Image (cartoon, rainbow, N blue to C red):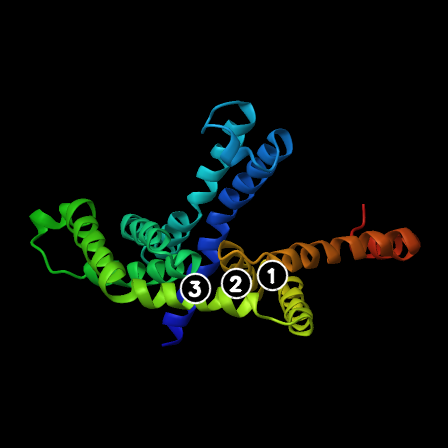
């Protein structure tokens, strides 16, 4: 059981790491599109109708890949390359069915363990070569599609909708407490499991339309380096002494 939890934890960290460039690139390009063309650029100009619109929609397309990439690389972390295809399809279906980030995460985990079991199918040596290129992709995508559409898609969508409603209904005091906890988790291990889990929650909330957790993530991530910079400015001599002691020339 511990191994299963470790696999899920590593899958989450891997998936978020691979997904992050799409979030960053898409978010910045969307912001640039708004900056150049105005906030009404999605509705006032045809898709790719001018330079600002092109930047905006390219960013949107990059951002839309967030959930398929998350599902793919969570699955990849658990069961290597054969799990990429089922995980990506599961992530795409999660986005299409409305469960978004949360659904893609669950789809990636299920796809990873599903492919791990499919790898154990006993086959004659002459047919082993078609297992990763034919049997696993077809069976994996079929099972993931059926699971997402008929079994877990609606419950995950309901959970995502519930998260949206809960965040939207928070009082100011509750939002402050959530921000404090969330910010501490982000800055606690800087790239470790707590950081990744907290950032995953922030992305799920932002996809649901609530940007408060992601805002606290950005603030919390900037606090430690700014604190170090201020400390160096205030007491440069102490840092020089530490550097001379631990990093001799």
Quarter of the image where one finds residue 116: bottom left
What is the CA distance from the residue labelled 1 to the residue labelled 3? 15 Å
Which residue bears the numbered disc 1?
A: 213
Q: Which residue is mark 3?
A: 160
Q: Is there any visible trace of residue 142 in the rendered image?
A: yes
User: In the rendered view, would you say 160 is above or below 21?
Assistant: below
N-terminal of the pair, mark 1 or mark 3, is 3
What x and y, as percent, mark residue 62?
Answer: 46, 39
Callouts 2 and 1 close, C-beta under 8 Å: yes
- Residue density around tag 2, few if under 14, some if 14–19, many if 20 or more, within 10 Å: some
Label 3 Cα neighbours within 10 Å, binned few <14 / some 14-19 / many ≥20: many
Residue shown at 81% from the left, 50% from the top: 248
**Quadrant in which the N terminus is drawn:** bottom left
Measured Cα–Cα span from mark 3 to mark 2: 11 Å
Cα separation, mark 2 vs mark 1, equals 8 Å
> Image quarter for residue 77?
bottom left
Where 77 falls versus 50 (above or below)? below
Relative to 69, is 199 on the left or the right? right
Residue at figure coordinates x 34%, y 51% from the top left: 96
Q: Nearer the viewer, mark 3 or mark 2?
A: 3
Please tell me which residue lies in front, 173 or 247: 173
Residue 154: x and y, percent? 31, 64
Kindly identify the residue that appears in the image at 23 percent across and 55 percent down: 145
10 Å neighbourhood of mark 1: few (<14), some, or many (≥20)?
Answer: many
Q: Secondary structure at mark 1?
A: helix
User: Dot 2 lies on which element?
Assistant: helix
- Vertical relation: 97 (above or below) 48: below
Q: Return the disc, 3 or 2, that comes first in the chain's sequence.
A: 3
Residue 201 - label: 2
Extreme residue in the front direction: 44
């Amino acid at each position: 059981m511990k191994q299963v939890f470790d696999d899920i934890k590593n899958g989450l960290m891997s998936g978020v790491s691979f997904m992050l460039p799409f979030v960053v690139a898409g978010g910045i390009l969307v912001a640039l599109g708004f900056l150049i063309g105005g906030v009404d650029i999605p509705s006032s100009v045809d898709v790719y109708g001018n330079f600002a619109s092109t930047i905006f929609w390219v960013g949107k397309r990059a951002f839309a890949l967030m959930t398929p990439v998350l599902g793919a690389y969570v699955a990849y972390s658990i069961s290597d390359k054969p799990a990429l295809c089922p995980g990506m399809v599961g992530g795409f279906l999660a986005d299409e069915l409305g469960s978004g980030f949360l659904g893609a995460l669950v789809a990636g985990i299920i796809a990873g363990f599903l492919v791990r079991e499919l790898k154990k199918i006993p086959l004659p040596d002459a047919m082993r070569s078609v297992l990763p290129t034919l049997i696993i992709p077809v069976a994996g995508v079929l099972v993931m599609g059926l699971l997402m559409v008929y079994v877990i898609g609606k419950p995950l969508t309901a959970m995502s909708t519930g998260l949206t409603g809960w965040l939207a209904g928070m009082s100011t005091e509750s939002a402050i407490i959530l921000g404090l906890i969330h910010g501490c988790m982000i800055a606690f291990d800087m790239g470790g499991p707590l950081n990744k889990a907290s950032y995953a929650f922030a992305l799920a909330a932002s996809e649901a339309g609530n940007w408060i957790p992601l805002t606290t993530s950005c603030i919390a991530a900037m606090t430690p380096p700014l604190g170090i910079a201020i400390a160096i400015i205030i007491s440069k001599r102490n840092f020089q002494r530490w550097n001379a002691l631990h990093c001799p020339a």
